[in-house]
Image (tube, rainbow, N blue to C red):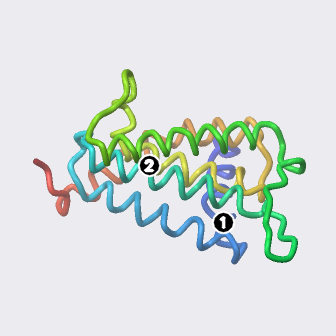
Amino acid sequence: MHPYWTAFAELIRKPFENTSLIWGIVPLYFALLLSEMTSSKANFRTAIQTGFSFIWSAIQWLYPYFVHHGTKARLDLGAMLPVNLFVTFLVLGLGMVAFVSGIRRHYPKYCAFLGYTRFANYFMITIFPIQARVLQWQWNYVIAIAVFAVPVWLVLHFGLMPVRAEK
């Protein structure tokens, strides 16, 4: 269990060691706290929160790949690893669907899960340093994310219960 604890601690710590990543990760922590303060029921407002977190993360991961030539900028994805590219565009696509669903107050078929923002923020926070290429995709990180998902959720759920607005 110790290697996974170490991996999990590294996933949480790494973004704060690199100043350029702080602006990307801090809003995700605020979104996690905001989602923990609201009802656990999925609704269209939580879909907007999920969409924001996903879109914000994807934009942060894509930003380093914009190449500026004078007044024009273009996206150069050649240096991005295929797994990072896949995860980034999956997150961006899901984020846009969630955000638009929240605004339109209608989910596409089989997409109502996008209204559950709590776990979405946890996963965005934990994969953020990997997707930002500060860490590499490794199995110990993936396993640590899965192993600590429930304990983190329990701590947040019961720790913030006194201030949560349940409806």
- Residue 105 image offset from top left, x and y in percent: 26, 41
- Residue 100 image offset from top left, x and y in percent: 39, 44
Name the secondary structure under disc 2. Answer: helix
Please, what is the three-letter code of the amino acid marked with disc 2? Gly
Please, what is the three-letter code of the amino acid marked with disc 1? Pro
Residue at the front extreme?
Answer: 71
Residue occupying the point 71% across, 51% down: 131
**Between 80 and 122, the one nearer to me in the picture:** 80
Cα separation, mark 1 vs mark 2, equals 21 Å
**Between 167 and 138, the one nearer to me in the picture:** 167
**Between 25 and 68, the one nearer to me in the picture:** 68
Residue occupying the point 72% across, 73% down: 18
Up the image or down, 22 lies above or below 151; here it is below
Residue tagged 1 = 15
Up the image or down, 167 lies above or below 90; here it is below
- Name the quadrant containing residue 4: top right
Residue tagged 2 = 51
Residue occupying the point 67% across, 69% down: 21
- Name the quadrant containing residue 108: top left
- Name the quadrant containing residue 82: top right
